[in-house]
C-alpha cells in the first residue's frame, strides 16, 4: 500500500492517453499515484485525441525542455464534405459540400503538403492571445486573428480510403503543427471541406513507442511497481554523447562551475551535429546535462545526486 513517506521516483512514463480526457487531467491522476513527487508532461493532446503523452516524474521534469521541439507522428481520420467550427468532430457543423476526392486525387495533392509550410492555426486552438487561450475567446464570439506560423511536414501519406467520405492518414510533422488545420487545408485544396474524426499520436521524436495505458497505471497498488515502470531520465537523449565523471568533477559541475575537457575527451565527444550537448554521469547516475564550449564543459541542467547513494548503486 502507498504511504505518505518520501518517495524517490525519477524517470519517464510514456502514457497512452485515452479519449475524452485532457492532458492535464491525465497528469493529475498520475500525480496522485506518486504522492509528493513532482510530475509534468510535454506535448498537449486535446481531449478528443489519444496516444503518446510523455510524463516526466521527479528529476525528469528538469529535462522536459530537451524534447519539447521534437517532431511528432500522428494517425488521423478525415471526414470529407463537412466543415466544423473547431476543425474536429466535437465542433458544430457549419458548411457542407458533396465532393469526395478519390485515392488518386488525394495522393496527387498530398505532395503539396510536404516540406516547409506556413500554417494558420484554428481559432479554437490552445494558442494564447494576450494571455488568454484562443478557444476561450472564440467561444465568446469575439473577433481576433492568429498569425501564421512556419511548420515542417516531414512525411504525409494516405493509409487507406475507408469509404467514400472517410480517409485514414499518417503524418510526421514538426512541433507546433496543428493536424486538424492540416486536414482542413488538404480538403480545401481538393475543392471540398473536411474535419478530423479521430487523432492519435503514435510517435514522439525517437522515443520508445511502447506505451502504457492510464488504467494500467491506476490499477497498480504499490509505489515500487510504479517506479519499476519508469524509463531512465537519459532515455530521451538520442544521438547525444555521454561522458563519465569522477567524484571531483561531478561535485564541481553540481556547484554550477565548468570543468576542463581534455583533448582526448573533446575528440571522443565530437558532436557538433547535436549542438555539442553532452550528458555526464557519475557511477551510472545522471549528474548534469551540458555542452562543450572550446576546451570547457559547462553544466546546463544539474540533477543534484546523492553521492553516497550513487556509490552504493555502483
Image: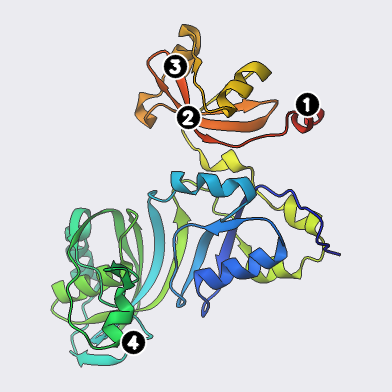
Q: Residue at x 47, y 31 (%)?
A: 240
Q: Quadrant of residue 217?
A: bottom right
N-terminal-most mark, 2 or 1: 2
Q: Is residue 87 visible?
A: no
Q: Are marks 1 and 4 in contact (CB under 8 Å)?
A: no
Residue 57 is left or right of residue 270, and the answer is: right
Q: In front: mark 3 or mark 4?
A: 3
Front-most of residues 210 and 19: 19
Q: Position of residue 294 (x, y in %)?
A: 37, 15
N-terminal-most mark, 1 or 3: 3
N-terminal-most mark, 3 or 4: 4
Alpha carbon separation for disc pair 3 and 2:
10 Å
Residue 290's tag is: 2
Q: Residue at x 42, y 13 (%)?
A: 295
Q: Secondary structure at mark 3?
A: strand
Alpha carbon separation for disc pair 1 and 3:
26 Å
- Residue that mark 3 sits on: 296
Task: Classify mark 4: residues with Cα within 10 Å, few (<14), some (14-19) or many (20+).
Answer: some
Query: Where 304 falls versus 231 (above or below)?
Result: above
Alpha carbon separation for disc pair 1 and 4:
56 Å
Q: Residue at x 23, y 92 (%)?
A: 94
- Residue that mark 4 sits on: 91
- Residue that mark 1 sits on: 311
Residue 255's tag is: none
Amino acid at each position: 500500500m502507498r504511504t505518505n513517506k518520501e518517495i524517490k521516483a525519477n524517470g519517464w512514463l510514456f502514457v497512452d492517453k485515452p479519449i475524452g480526457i485532457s492532458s492535464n487531467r491525465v497528469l493529475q491522476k498520475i500525480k496522485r499515484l506518486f504522492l509528493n513527487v513532482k510530475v509534468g508532461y510535454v506535448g498537449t493532446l486535446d481531449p478528443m485525441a489519444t496516444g503518446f503523452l510523455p510524463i516526466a516524474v521527479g528529476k525528469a521534469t528538469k529535462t522536459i525542455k530537451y524534447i519539447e521541439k521534437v517532431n511528432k507522428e500522428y494517425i488521423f481520420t478525415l471526414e470529407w464534405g463537412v466543415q466544423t467550427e473547431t476543425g474536429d468532430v466535437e465542433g458544430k457543423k457549419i458548411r457542407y459540400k458533396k465532393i469526395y476526392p478519390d485515392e488518386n486525387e488525394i495522393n496527387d495533392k498530398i505532395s503539396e503538403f510536404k516540406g516547409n509550410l506556413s500554417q494558420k492555426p484554428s481559432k479554437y486552438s490552445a494558442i494564447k492571445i494576450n494571455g488568454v487561450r484562443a478557444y476561450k475567446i472564440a467561444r465568446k464570439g469575439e473577433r481576433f486573428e492568429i498569425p501564421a506560423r512556419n511548420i515542417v511536414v516531414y512525411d504525409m501519406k494516405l493509409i487507406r480510403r475507408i469509404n467514400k467520405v472517410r480517409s485514414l492518414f499518417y503524418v510526421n510533422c514538426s512541433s507546433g503543427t496543428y493536424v486538424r488545420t492540416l486536414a482542413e487545408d488538404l480538403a480545401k485544396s481538393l475543392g471540398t471541406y473536411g474535419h478530423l474524426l479521430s487523432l492519435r499520436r503514435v510517435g514522439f521524436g525517437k522515443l520508445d513507442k511502447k506505451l502504457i495505458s492510464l488504467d494500467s497505471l491506476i490499477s497498480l497498488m504499490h509505489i515500487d511497481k510504479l517506479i519499476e515502470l519508469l524509463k531512465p531520465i537519459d532515455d530521451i537523449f538520442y544521438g547525444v554523447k555521454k561522458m563519465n565523471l569522477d567524484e571531483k568533477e561531478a561535485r564541481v559541475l553540481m556547484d554550477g562551475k565548468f570543468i576542463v575537457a581534455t583533448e582526448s575527451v573533446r575528440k571522443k565527444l565530437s558532436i557538433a551535429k547535436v549542438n555539442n550537448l553532452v550528458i555526464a554521469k557519475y557511477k551510472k547516475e545522471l549528474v548534469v546535462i551540458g555542452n562543450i564550449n572550446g576546451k570547457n564543459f559547462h553544466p546546463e541542467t544539474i540533477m543534484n545526486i546523492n553521492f553516497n547513494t550513487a556509490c552504493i548503486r555502483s
